[in-house]
C-alpha cells in the first residue's frame, strides 16, 4: 500500500515555478517528509526535508499544512536541467531508523 | 556533503554466476544501510535493510538466499546476487544512515550499480 500519492507526470517551461503536491494521508506523528530528485541512471539526490509549516533552502521550498496530510514541493524558475523524477517520501521510523519506501514519483519535463 | 560510493558502477556477468556490489560510506559511519532495485522507468523498490554486525532484514518477496547481504563494517555493505539470471538485470542502489543521526532522517544514496546478466 503506497504511503504517498503524487501526479505521475508534469510539464513546465523554463523560468516557470513548478509546484508538485504529494498526498500522505496516513502520515505518522514521527514521520518527516522528504523529497528526492533522480536523474536517469543515478541515485536519488536529497532536495529538502520538513516536518511542518514551510521549509526553504537554496534549491526549493516545501509547504506542509497543519494536518500534514499533504505537502507541496516548489521549484522556483525551473531550467532544463530540472527535468527529472521527483519522489515524495515519508519515513517509516519504526525500528529506530527511517526506512524509505518510494512511490511512483513525478516525472517533470521542463521544455525550452 | 556525505558521500556514498558504489562499486562497480556497471557490471556484466554470465547467467549462473554470482556478482558482488559494494556500498561504502566514505566520510561517515553507517550502522544501517539499505539496498534498492530499480527497473527501467520504474520506481525504487526496497529489497533489504542491512545492519552492521547482524543479519539483514529482507522485504517481503525478496529471496534472502538469492541476494546475500553482508554488512561487516560501519562503512561497507555488500550485496551479492547469486546464480544470476537475466531477470536479475537491474539498477541496484544503496543508501546509508549516519550513525550519528539518531533520528534516522538523514539518508544518503549511492550512485547506483547497473547489473546486466547475459
Image (cartoon, helix red, strand yellow):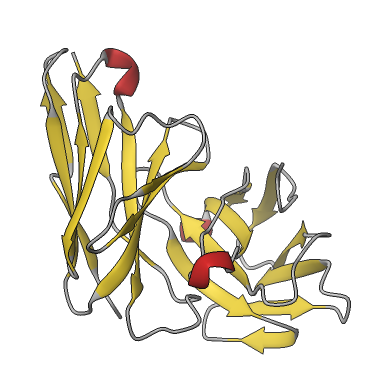
**Residue A95's x, y, as percent?**
52, 66
User: In this view, which residue lies farthest toward the front?
Assistant: B54
Position of residue B91 in the picture relative to residue B104 (left or right) = left
Residue at the spot 50% in from the left edge and 82% down from the top edge: B103
Q: Is B8 above or below relative to A64?
A: above
Residue at the spot 69% in from the left edge and 48% down from the top edge: A11
The quarter of the picture where residue A88 lies is bottom right
Q: Is B113 above or below relative to A24?
A: above
Q: Is residue B100 visible?
A: yes
Q: Is B66 above or below relative to B50?
A: above
Q: Is residue A112 visible?
A: no
The quarter of the picture where residue B2 lies is bottom left
Q: Nearer the viewer, residue A13 or A93?
A: A93
Q: Is B39 above or below relative to A92?
A: above
**Residue A25's x, y, as percent?**
84, 60
The quarter of the picture where residue A94 lies is bottom right
Position of residue A61 in the picture relative to residue A68 (left or right) = left
**Residue B63's x, y, as percent?**
37, 29
Residue at the spot 17% in from the left edge and 44% down from the top edge: B9
**Residue B11's x, y, as percent?**
14, 32
Total marks shown come to: 0
User: In this view, which residue lies farthest toward the right?
Assistant: A67
| Placement of the N terminus of chain A among the 4 image quadrants | top right
Residue at the spot 42% in from the left edge and 50% down from the top edge: A39
Amino acid at each position: 500500500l503506497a504511503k504517498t500519492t503524487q501526479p505521475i507526470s508534469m510539464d513546465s517551461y523554463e523560468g516557470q515555478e513548478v509546484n508538485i503536491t504529494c498526498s500522505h494521508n496516513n502520515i505518522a506523528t514521527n514521520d518527516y517528509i522528504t523529497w528526492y530528485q533522480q536523474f536517469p541512471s543515478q541515485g536519488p539526490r536529497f532536495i529538502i526535508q520538513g516536518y511542518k509549516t514551510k521549509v526553504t533552502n537554496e534549491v526549493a521550498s516545501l509547504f506542509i499544512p497543519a494536518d500534514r496530510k499533504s505537502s507541496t514541493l516548489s521549484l522556483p524558475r525551473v531550467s532544463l536541467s530540472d527535468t527529472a523524477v521527483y519522489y515524495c517520501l515519508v519515513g517509516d521510523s519504526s525500528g529506530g531508523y527511517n526506512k524509505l519506501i518510494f512511490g511512483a514519483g513525478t516525472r517533470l519535463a521542463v521544455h525550452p | 556533503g556525505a558521500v556514498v560510493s558504489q562499486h562497480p558502477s556497471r557490471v556484466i556477468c554470465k547467467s549462473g554466476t554470482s556478482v558482488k556490489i559494494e556500498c561504502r560510506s566514505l566520510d561517515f559511519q553507517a550502522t544501517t544501510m539499505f539496498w534498492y532495485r530499480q527497473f527501467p522507468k520504474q520506481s525504487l523498490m526496497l529489497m533489504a535493510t542491512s545492519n552492521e554486525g547482524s543479519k539483514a532484514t529482507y522485504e517481503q518477496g525478496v529471496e534472502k538466499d538469492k541476494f546475500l547481504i553482508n554488512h561487516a563494517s560501519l562503512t561497507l555493505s555488500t550485496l551479492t546476487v547469486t546464480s544470476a539470471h537475466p531477470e536479475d538485470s537491474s539498477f541496484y542502489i544503496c543508501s546509508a544512515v549516519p550513525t550519528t543521526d539518531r533520528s534516522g532522517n538523514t539518508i544518503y544514496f549511492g550512485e547506483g550499480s547497473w547489473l546486466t546478466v547475459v
